[in-house]
Image (cartoon, grey):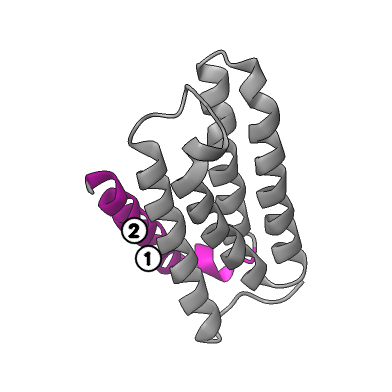
Amino acid sequence: MMPLLTGVLLALATAIGGWVVGFTRERGFFPVVLIVIATYNLLFAVMADSPGTLRPELDAAIVFLALAVAGYKRSLWLVALGLFAHGVFDAFHGRLIANPGVPEFWPAFCAGYDLAFAACLSLLLASGAQPPSR
């Protein structure tokens, strides 16, 4: 429960801090966060020296990278969808990809972060305060 709660709180801190500083006014803020989130499992595969894990992790990361780019170009709702989908992916990651480098706490932490950050972006978009379109 602690990793999940920590993830949620850090996502809220990132979103609120980004809003206070003005990052959320920039269209690229949320897509870049999604791209960074999507690459952590690749890092864990490298840290575990697990080359066989790199391909499935790269395939998954490409899906989320594509959502981030499409969301940046077309609609940030696609980024919110990508963040939400990555949170669900995290919850089931261990059943989908055997990555020995993933810390035990990571799936719950990252799912909490992703889902809370998706909710923050969705609230921003629903309020009409979204960054300008491309």
20 lies left or right of 1: right
Q: Is residue 61 magenta?
A: no
> Is 106 rendered above or below residue 125?
above
Q: Residues within 10 Å of mark 2 (few under 14, many from 20)?
A: few
Q: Which residue is mark 1?
A: 16
Q: With 92 as the anchor, is 63 left or right in this view?
A: right
Q: Residue 132 at what x, y percent from top left?
A: 67, 76
**CA separation, marks 2 and 1?**
5 Å
Instruction: Give the SS element for disc 2.
Output: helix
Task: Check disc 1 and give the amino acid type.
Answer: Ile
Which segment did they paint magenta? Answer: 2-27
Is the Cβ of the residue at disc 2 closer than 8 Å to that at disc 1? yes
Few, some or many C-alpha atoms within 10 Å of disc 1 (few <14, some 14-19, many ≥20)? some
Seen as rendered, the residue at the extreme top is 49
Q: Residue at x 51, y 62 (%)?
A: 23
> Under tag 1, what secondary structure?
helix
Q: Amino acid at mark 2?
A: Ala
Q: Residue furthest left?
A: 2
